[in-house]
Amino acid sequence: MNDVDAYLAKIPARQRAALETLRGIIQAAVPEATEVISYRIPTFRHHGGLVAFAGFKEHCSFFVMSPAVMAAHKSDLKGHHTSKGTIRFTPDAPLPPALVKKLVKARVAENEARAARRR
């Protein structure tokens, strides 16, 4: 069992199922990303922090980790509970897979562009 699996094992069943689905969508969108625990939550890394997720008592959070990506996809995020770099959702109303994939791909492009500028 890796650290992310251990994290998920401690989450209530409803949130765990939603987060495992989210995790699978992220893994499929960017299979080269690595999973770590950062700031005590599951985080995907690809040229730096990419996206993260967490489960809470009443909701789940998908951390896009980029206000710029959130702003660029503002119209896609209508109807979702958002803050600067986070989308909150409930297990009963999970995020659409297409939206998750679009946001993850945007973060990959952002991180890869930043890595290219550093070279």
Image (tube, rainbow, N blue to C red):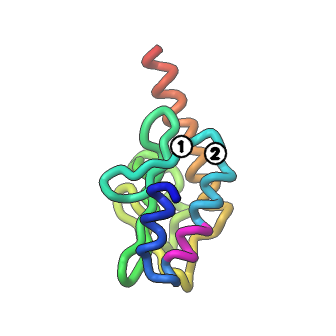
Relative height, residue 61 to residue 85 (above, below): below
Horizontal and vertical percent position of residue 119? 47, 14
Q: Which residues are magenta?
A: 16-21
14 relative to 72, above or below: below
Say what secondary structure mark 2 lies in: loop
Examine the structure image and report whether residue 20 is included in the region drawn in magenta.
yes
Instruction: Using the image, tell me which numbered label, if any, was put on residue 30.
Output: 2
Decide: is 91 above or below 107.
below
Q: Is residue 60 visible?
A: yes
Q: Which mark is residue 57?
A: none
Residue that appears at 53% across and 81% down: 91
Q: Nearer the viewer, mark 2 or mark 1?
A: 1
Image x and y of residue 94, in percent: 57, 76
Residue found at the far top of this picture: 119
| In magenta segment, residue 7 | no
Label 2: how many Cα within 10 Å (few below 14, some 14–19, many 20+) = some
Residue assigned mark 1:
34
Q: Report whether 18 appears left or right of 61.
A: right
Residue at 58 percent of width and 61 percent of height: 23
The residue at the point 52 percent across, 83 percent down is 14
116 or 15: nearer the viewer:
15
x, y percent for residue 113: 52, 28
Residue 71, can we see it?
A: no
Task: For the residues labelled 2 and 1, say whether their Cβ atoms are less than 8 Å apart.
Answer: no
Circle 2: residue type: Val
Q: CA distance from mark 2 to mark 1?
A: 9 Å
Amino acid at dot 1: Thr
Query: Of helix, strand and loop, which mostly describes the magenta segment?
Result: helix
